[in-house]
Image: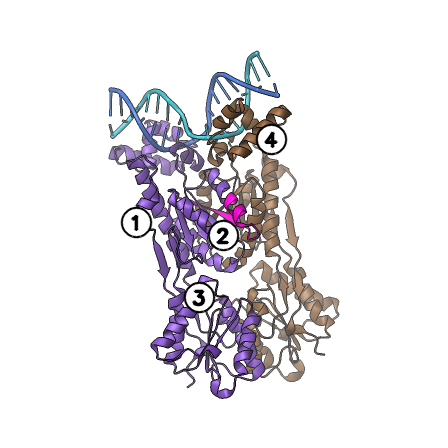
Chain colours: A brown, B purple, C cyan, D blue
Amino acid sequence: MARTIGDIARLAGVSKATVSRVLNNKPDVDPATRERILRIIEEENFVPSFTASNLASGHNRFISMLMPTSLWNFLSDVIKGVAEVISLSAYQLVLHVLPDTLDAEAQCKYIENILAMKLTAGLLAFFPKDSAPYLEQLYQQGFPVVILDDQRPLVAAPWIGADNKGGAYIAVQHLLRLGHRHIAHISLPQHLLFARERYQGYCQALEEAGIALDPELVVAGDFPMQSGQHAAEKLFHLPPERRPTAIFASLDMQAYGVIHAAQQYGLRIPDDIALVGFDDNETSLIVHPSLTTIRQPRYEMGQRGVQLLLSIIEESRVHAHNNSSPKLRSVQQPPVRLQLPMTLVVRDSSQPSQ
Amino acid sequence: MARTIGDIARLAGVSKATVSRVLNNKPDVDPATRERILRIIEEENFVPSFTASNLASGHNRFISMLMPTSLWNFLSDVIKGVAEVISLSAYQLVLHVLPDTLDAEAQCKYIENILAMKLTAGLLAFFPKDSAPYLEQLYQQGFPVVILDDQRPLVAAPWIGADNKGGAYIAVQHLLRLGHRHIAHISLPQHLLFARERYQGYCQALEEAGIALDPELVVAGDFPMQSGQHAAEKLFHLPPERRPTAIFASLDMQAYGVIHAAQQYGLRIPDDIALVGFDDNETSLIVHPSLTTIRQPRYEMGQRGVQLLLSIIEESRVHAHNNSSPKLRSVQQPPVRLQLPMTLVVRDSSQPSQ
DNA sequence: CTGTTAGCGCATTCAG
DNA sequence: CTGAATGCGCTAACAG
């Protein structure tokens, strides 16, 4: 079994350089020789050393994926998309888990360290929060970076996320089409961008339907299930004529709390109260009644994220080839910002009461 | 900013070799010089090239994690454990997703290819199924491999999994302690090792309690929720005196089906039927009633898995150093096989009816 | 204890 | 179109 390019070269009766040319798909090789070399490579089951070729060429073929320890469930779908795209490329995926406990500075140091090892061609950062400014700067300096779903309105780096406002809009529209006019919303802390966006989508749908916003029907919520339960209790305590006939929760998690509260109050879902969540957790199919919700395109987010990153890497390579000056990105066009559409998944919790 | 070892060497007024010695914690360096070099490395924020050091030293510091595309949810916890341990080591984690659609041969080829790239120091394979024999062979030949949770009774490679039988045993014991004597079991296809083990745990607990196994109370189940529902319906159709007062399901997923069936039959959980699942899915906290279940130590599995792998890598390195013959493992002691204990998580579905 | 030397396996010049 | 030569950044063997 051939171990190095040299072995193949010897077997084929050519120089190592020629084998290398074939391996890297260089055009200037005699077709017959190329054919012969390829056959031998195949026979010998030869794969060039990833490490050596990275070192010699000067560019690496590793993609580093940066991920916070929280949001793990959400992430597993994203990784799946990322891994699939990478497996079709010449790259390998290196996973770096960024402990949430680190402060902004420590996070930047962590990232700096990864870069300093010089094993990565580009960074895919998921929900970077505090380290986002550093990543933007990195991108501005010419290093390939893609940010996935960070919660900042304007990011000076390529960004891929989900259309939270649009998702909320179709959720509420769905309830409106079912005939509901009193639709409540359980919100999330408004310092988070996606929380605001979901609220905005709710408002817009109501407005377009000519329904005035009823402040009484907007209840502050939070991440845990209990917050949904408490919010629902508030709504259920309203006098019947002011009580909502439908609830749009900012999270599936909150919606589970609503289901519990409804059980306690003897209210039936969807007959007395229609319910729509947001996220499409796996659990939402299993709770009773199954939950109508908005599905985030997590898998696609991962896919599109690496695809974008890979294209940026390629681009910066030709760029580096053409004019050797390490041009800053700022002179170029503004970075890609892609908001993937959400989809409505209708289940029992909002079935039209027949 | 210093870019290479050479830069540091120049700044410190020593040779590159000495800097390299400090970087690799070699003992034979003058303490004062070491101190000075370390300070400069710190100041200059220098990190050696991962690629170059891998190439030069001949041993890589990448751990490859092989994972099937199915079982993804389960995996996310495992990765978390793996990533945490790796982040404390000098290694990096490379993720390889093994498509489930590949047949055994294609899987082996896929793995061979990873090895041929020579970027990995060891393989951590999760639930390898068809490729397990190949991995064992690899281990026998001296390559560091650890298998996580494969479903084969005897594996000729280091193995870390969960104690399924023990978990089932404590689940049933819990029900026995609550006073139940008619405990049903919803099984899984018995060609799977963990399915058999869970069944065995059930049998053993009953036997030790002096209760004869009632074949009528063992119902064949499968993976989807519906299978649990169907199994429960069979049990609920039994005449009252032969009907179970408790059910031990092989999976939380099945238990969700039982909850649905109970609702339809007007049976209350836990008052009429106590219920225990297995796996501790995240959902099990949210279903109503919340589900008593057996928690798999997934995170710990990941941790112990890499720890074991890292130690095997170290060991094989000293081994290779001492006697240059590529000794086969077969002459050594049998590989580690570690079954991690499961824990019982008591929730509402099995509360003692007070 | 330290410096010098020679590669690791490949990609990339530069001649031919 | 092809081969020989050089070096990527680091480690390891060998002298001193």
- Whether residues under marks 1 and 4 lie with C-beta atoms below 8 angstroms apart, the answer is no
At numbered mark 3, what does the secondary structure look like: helix, strand or loop? helix
- Label 1 lies in what chain? B
Q: Are marks 1 and 3 on the same chain?
A: yes
Which residue, given by chain and number where applicable, does mark 1 sit on?
B333
Mark closer to the observer (3, 4): 3
In the drawing, what numbered circle is on residue A298?
none
Identified by mark 2, the residue type is Asp
- In this view of the protein, which residue sits in the foreground, A248 or B320? B320
Q: Nearer the viewer, residue B130 or A227?
A: B130
Instruction: Please say if the residues under marks 1 and 3 sit with CB atoms less than 8 Å apart.
Output: no
Q: Which residue is mark 4?
A: A25
Q: Chain of mark 4?
A: A
Cα distance between the residues tagged 4 and 2 = 34 Å
Instruction: Assess disc 3: are there few (<14), some (14-19) or many (≥20) residues with their C-alpha within 10 Å of its C-alpha.
Output: some
Q: CA distance from mark 1 to mark 3?
A: 28 Å
Q: Is residue B106 magenta?
A: yes
Amino acid at circle 3: Arg
Q: Amino acid at mark 1?
A: Gln
Q: How many marks?
A: 4
Q: Is residue A40 magenta?
A: no
Q: Secondary structure at mark 2?
A: helix
Q: Is residue B251 visible?
A: yes
Task: Please tell me in which quadrant of the rendered image residue A331 appears.
Answer: top right
**What distance separates the C-alpha of mark 3 from that of mark 2?**
19 Å
Callouts 3 and 2 close, C-beta under 8 Å:
no
The location of residue B120, given as percent across then percent down, is 44, 41
Identify the amino acid type marked 4.
Asn
Question: The C terminus of chain B appears in which quarter of the rendering?
Answer: bottom left
Q: Secondary structure under badge 1?
A: loop
Q: Earlier in the sequence, mark 1 or mark 2?
A: 2
